[in-house]
Image: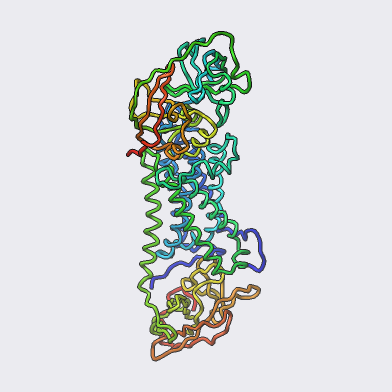
């Protein structure tokens, strides 16, 4: 039986054990520091989305369209937002602007707020009250819906605001509950296609026949799915009416 | 050992233990939070709130892994026993780190909506019927509740109030917490990662916990079990060593520690009255059996802690048949005095140099 130093907590550590304990202390500190580096440096790129506060507050005039999610088709832009651009609108936090946009459906309106930008994806977080969204003088041009046929697409349903840069990362399963909360709050949902669709990576996704995204689809939010649906171009925005019965998880 | 409850009975070793632990946690968090952003080649940085949440969550996992490795490591190599000494503080610190992680998550992912963030946490993702997209937050909630229960009951007051067996069983919740954390990670961040370094580290940590526990179990599995009710052979008289014990497992699963002190044998329960520490792996110091975990002491003949302390453990009867020492499996009530069994002078093992006789 070999002799072993015996440690008693309230007594000084035996001499032969001190070297071992000291090495354990160093190993613990260095090991956790190393683990912190490896884990921290392994984080994936969250993408380029961001609130563009550096652009300043943007104010444009356009036609409001409920798709059923509120979209503005710009008629009178500024140096950053050009006439013909279409972008989705949202309010502060996890809230949409449906209540304010609905009375203006099909009408000319002035929109003011901060832009969220991720590549080709734009969204405007409009200011509160009438300062953010108000009727404008003038005749509203008719926005033509151009059917593009039925498409089978693969990709991920996200909430448009977080994806566009309200959160980084703003997609993926770790973000699923947050995305669901946004969608429940009427933030427009976006489908991120794995392949460009008519030149677009991001599509506004709705239910069939101009309805909102069905609640059944929320189970598939933030997952890689394949589904079919009718595709329509509205202004320069593609709207995909997903057929909930065709949704399948993809590898 | 104490006759009154104080928040923490500090001593130099506890200060050192906590200092090292805090330094390790601070090193992890500092490197994760302030060093790695420079190493990441991202066009735009991860949101600070998410970065912080990840740092504290990963830190809590690493801390839990270390905590769960200490126990089996100490079973396999007694030099790790000092790491057990103040492990409760490690656990309490882990709880605070985990709470910080949950705070960042709640105040970011579940904030800014019209519903209460705690309500949102429970209903935002209700895809319980599927594996992919399963609401992994629920595992984190369960693990956090377990950790909070463990931290809240970690003080010796609760040990005394609940009794050591109940307290010990309650604190097996640490395993439920760890499995739940593993599920939380597996169904959450691991499903999202493109860079698999974290996955590898997670699997390595979990594998270390599992393998160390299996190794500790394997090292003790060949301990023969006695027959129920009969006197149990412990070993030849000559196999005992002055100041130390042999441990015998009984048919009912209990273990008996048979100590040799001053040429006489005495048997007490192997489980310390404090935290069920292995008394048989301790040593006799100043004529008292000293627990290797926290230094609780007992008179080996009566199983009683010296006054003014009140802890007691059961004692057992011994007999000598020829050269064979036997123990009776029926335990005496805790604190029952039993006359030591004298051994023939030639029967004891040589006393090592420098060892008290």
Closer to the camera in the image, A36 or A109: A109
Residue B115 picture quarter: top right
Name which residue lies at 57% across and 38% down.
B107
Q: Is residue B227 left or right of residue B23?
A: left
Give x and y (percent) for residue B105.
Answer: 53, 40
Give x and y (percent) for residue A112.
Answer: 57, 17
Residue A230 picture quarter: top left
The answer to whether residue B155 is above or below residue B46 is below
Q: Is residue B100 left or right of residue A227?
A: right
The answer to whether residue A112 is above or below residue B36 is above
Q: Is residue A209 left or right of residue A108?
A: left
Res A41 visible: no
Res A221 visible: yes
Query: In which quadrant of the rendered image does the N terminus of chain B lie?
Result: bottom right
Closer to the camera in the image, A209 or B232: A209
List the single residue furthest toward the top: A138
Name which residue lies at 62% across and 18% down.
A131
């Amino acid at each position: 039986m070999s002799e072993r130093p015996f440690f008693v907590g309230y007594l000084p550590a035996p001499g032969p054990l001190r070297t071992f304990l000291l090495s354990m202390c160093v190993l613990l500190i260095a090991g956790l520091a190393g683990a912190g580096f490896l884990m921290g440096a392994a984080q994936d790129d969250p993408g380029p989305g961001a609130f563009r506060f550096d652009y300043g507050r943007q104010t444009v005039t356009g036609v409001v369209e409920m798709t059923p999610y509120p979209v503005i088709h710009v008629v009178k832009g500024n140096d950053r937002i050009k006439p013909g651009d279409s972008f989705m609108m949202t309010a502060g936090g996890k809230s949409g602007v449906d209540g304010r946009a609905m009375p203006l459906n099909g009408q000319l309106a002035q929109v003011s707020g901060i832009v969220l930008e991720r590549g080709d994806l734009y969204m405007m977080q409009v200011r509160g009250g009438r300062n953010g969204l108000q009727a404008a003088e003038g005749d509203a041009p008719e926005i033509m819906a151009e059917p593009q046929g039925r498409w089978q697409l693969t990709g991920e349903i996200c909430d448009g605001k977080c994806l566009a840069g309200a959160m980084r990362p703003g997609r993926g399963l770790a973000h699923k509950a947050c995305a669901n909360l946004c969608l429940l709050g009427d933030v427009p949902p976006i489908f991120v296609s794995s392949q460009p669709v008519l030149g677009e990576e991001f599509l506004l996704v709705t239910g069939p026949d101009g309805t909102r995204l069905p609640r059944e689809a929320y189970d598939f939010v933030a997952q890689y799915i394949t589904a079919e649906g009718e595709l329509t171009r509205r202004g320069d925005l593609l709207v995909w009416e997903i057929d909930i019965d065709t949704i399948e998880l993809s590898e | 050992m104490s006759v009154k409850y104080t928040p923490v009975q500090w001593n130099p070793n506890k200060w050192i233990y906590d200092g090292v632990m805090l330094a390790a946690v601070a090193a992890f968090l500092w490197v994760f939070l302030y060093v790695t952003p420079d190493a990441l080649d991202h066009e735009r940085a991860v949101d600070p709130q998410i970065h912080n949440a990840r740092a504290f969550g990963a830190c809590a996992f690493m801390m839990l892994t270390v905590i769960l490795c200490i126990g089996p490591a100490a079973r396999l190599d007694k030099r790790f026993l000092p790491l057990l000494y103040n492990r409760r503080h490690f656990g309490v610190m882990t709880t605070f780190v985990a709470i910080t992680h949950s705070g960042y998550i709640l105040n970011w992912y579940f904030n800014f909506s019209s519903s209460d963030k705690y309500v949102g946490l429970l209903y935002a993702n209700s895809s319980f019927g599927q594996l992919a997209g399963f609401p992994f937050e629920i595992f984190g909630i369960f693990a956090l509740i377990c950790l909070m229960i463990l931290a809240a009951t970690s003080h010796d007051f609760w040990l005394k109030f609940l009794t050591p067996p109940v307290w010990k069983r309650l604190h097996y919740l640490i395993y439920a917490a760890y499995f739940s954390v593993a599920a939380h990670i597996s169904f959450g961040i691991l499903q999202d990662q493109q860079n698999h370094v974290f996955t590898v580290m997670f699997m390595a940590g979990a594998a270390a916990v599992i393998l160390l526990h299996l190794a500790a179990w394997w090292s003790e599995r060949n301990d023969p079990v006695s027959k129920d009710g009969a006197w149990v052979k412990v070993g030849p008289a000559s196999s005992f060593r002055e100041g130390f014990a042999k441990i015998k497992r009984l048919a009912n699963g209990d273990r008996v520690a048979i100590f040799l002190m001053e040429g006489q044998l005495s048997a007490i329960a192997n489980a310390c009255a404090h935290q069920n520490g292995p008394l048989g792996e301790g040593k006799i110091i100043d004529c008292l059996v000293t627990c290797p975990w926290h230094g609780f002491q007992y008179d080996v003949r009566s199983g009683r802690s010296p006054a003014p302390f009140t802890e007691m453990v059961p004692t057992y009867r011994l007999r000598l048949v020829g050269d064979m020492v036997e123990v009776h499996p029926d335990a005496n009530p805790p604190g029952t005095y039993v006359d030591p069994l004298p051994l023939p002078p030639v029967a004891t093992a040589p006393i090592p140099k420098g060892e008290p006789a």
